[in-house]
Amino acid sequence: MKISEQWLRQWVNPNNSSEQLAEQLTMAGLEIDDRFAVARAFSGVVVGEVISVEQHPDADKLRVTQVNIGASEPLQIVCGAPNVTVGMKAPVATVGAILPSDNGAGFEIKNGNLRGVDSNGMLCGASEIDLTDSIDGLLELPADAPIGMDIREYLGLDNQILDISITPNRGDCFSVRGIAREISVINDLPMQQPEIPANVAATDNSATPAVTVSAVEACPRYLLQSISNIDRSIDTPKWMQDALVQSGLRSHNFLVDVTNYVLMELGQPLHAFDADTIVGDIVVRLAEPSETITLLNEQTITLTGDELVIADDKGALALAGIMGGQRSSVTDSTTNIVLESAFFNPLAIAARARRFGLHTDASQRFERGVDFELPELALARATDLITSVTGGQAGQIVRAESTENLPARAPITLPLTKVRDVIGIEIEPAVMVRILTQLGFEVEQQADSLICTPPSYRFDMSIREDLIEEIARIYGYDNIPSVLPHLQVSMDYDDTADLTHEMKLALVDNGYMEAISFSFSDAKIEALLDDKALGEVLALANPISSDLAVMRRTLLSSLLPCVQYNLNRQQPRVRFFETGLSFVGQSISELVQTPSIALVAVGDVWDEQAYQNRALDFYDLKHDIEQLLPAQVDSARIRYERSKLAFLHPGQSAKLYIDDQYVGWLGQLHPNTAKQLDLPATWVAQLSLAPLLTLVREQHAITTPSKFPQVRRDIAILVDSDISLQTLEATIRAAAGELLTDMWLFDVYQGDKVPAGQRSLAFALIWQDRTQTLSDEAVKTATDKVVQALTEQHAAQLRDS
């Protein structure tokens, strides 16, 4: 938004330079994109009066003039402008004057001779002094322009134009009044507002059209006032033209200029209708589908039905808050108008202008939010300007209001300690109250907080952080010292990522490749992997595709499609793993997210080799799983139980426990499930990362190896086939005591020489004493205890051969 500094200083005039003023606004959040003078630099141009005009003796298009610039003698100047006349006042560039030029060097005026006639200076048009030409000829100055006065001073050409970038949340700053309000608070100065009557007394008894608002939510406040018998021979005053032009608006005619002036001054868009073109009463309503209207820019648009329009009995007169219609437009001959001032809900205006390729000053403001208490003041200001300049007669104001649909300004509680916590410094409560009060807030101070009600023009104020930002920016960011925050830093190192990476490397060493996929999965795959033990599935409210419609309960939902993809591309041996979250629960409130690691393997144990290969089996998968565990973990702490998950093979799957804590499952995908997925024998596993990481983090004591020899004894027993190996190992360890340092199963036999329902198991037992050499008798005694425990607890029979 462009705004004249001179106009701004009429409202509030701090004792600082243009540069300092721009810096203050920028630091307050109103960034100055550009700052420039009304006209480029030039010198030596004054106000002059033409006192005589004669035809050039040797040129039809030239005139010889005598010009009074307040010197002892008039200047003779040869001029070719067609509008030069006796008595007119115009800018005069005296000899030695430097006029602006495109190359930046300037153009010097010298004494000249044009076809035999001396010329001592130059009468100037607007373009010669870096203004916009509106006529072909000299720039005609008002009759009261003081002769001899420097033209820069008279026209205010040293006035600075501020081009301010207004952020979308600060619609209240789209006016001179809004910017002046900010400057007055920053500099703690009062604002000098122009005298605006509360309302202009009605002097016209003719009725203003009645108003009906059917779309009260979109337009909760609508005001109309008629003004009749306007003298259109009166031009827009120069001060108003200058203010508009310097704010980037083109001067049209007085009635349009007044509405634009109030728009720039107060921030309230107004619209003037030609009263003689209105048929019946005014209705504010939503457009009819396929209704058309021809706008002021001569563009005819077809409405869809959600646009707000101002209409009469004949149809739409204007696209509310955006642009008026051509049928009711004010022309140079219009003498009776109806002036509109309204509050439109931002949601009723937003996006409508862009829909039709329009961008107007009115829509720009209404979309961001205009002060809902401003329409009456702006209407009074515009009516006062029109009637005082043209002698028009004002009619009665017609109102249509729905107070319950006007925005509500709810109080915001601001704890005083919160200000210190956010800004980082102590600010006196009295300073906070002053800042917020001058910004227009109603402030009630309590012992430990401020209760602040935002003004009607601050739509962006809703939470306490908004208030803190207001305090900080007005207090001055430069006044807040730059200090490092006080941090309570914990030096504990989170090694989760490092330890997880080591697990990944262990799997890579065993031929696996890492997969990275979405946490979403296909509901069809989740249905195939359905089991109550896994929990409930969370469906997405707005999935990105049909095959990513639910959250995965197991990482297999992501890995199995990867296996399918590779098998379909002639890759018979596939090894994948993935780390990530699994999600269980039917709602966000009860959702359980578990960091997990999952494996999937298909094909032979090795890549195709010259020697004998074989298909992967359960023990190969078990080996890969145990590679994730620290080597020093005692095997007695690891336990496997048969898994009952429905999607796993009942005889080729297990649950893994460490220290009796459930960690996860492993095994072969159930043949029926694999068949439905068009997969061969597939081996899968999923483990929770938390217990694995706890195990890896354990501190293991370093012990000196014993210098005494180990003794090995092997035993072979016959036991029932349904007795698990883990049960037998637990019995052996309990009976053996501390002398048993290691043990393992090295033979399993079932055949003709073993009774039905039984199997032969051979164990290697390693005995060692850390303090002395074991005797044969001590080893025999310990071994006998083991055999006895197996016999008594499991009816085991010792085999001699």
Image: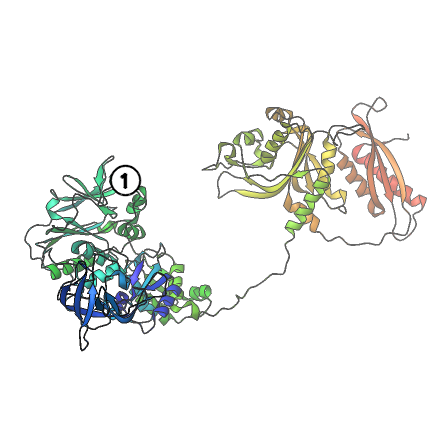
Q: Quadrant of residue 172?
A: bottom left
Quick check: 69 above or below 371?
below
Whether residue 230 is visible: yes
Quick check: 648 above or below 16?
above
Depth order, front residue of 745/494: 494
Quick check: 795 above or below 477?
above
Q: Quadrant of residue 396?
A: bottom left
Q: Split into 4 quadrants, where in the image is the C terminus?
A: top right
Q: Split into 4 quadrants, where in the image is the N terminus?
A: bottom left
Depth order, front residue of 660/746: 746
> Residue 86: x, y in percent?
13, 65
Check disc 1 and give the amino acid type. Answer: Asp
Q: Residue at x 88, y 39 (%)?
A: 784
For mark 1, what is the residue? 306
Residue found at the far bottom of this picture: 72
**In the image, is 47 to the left or to the right of 97?**
left
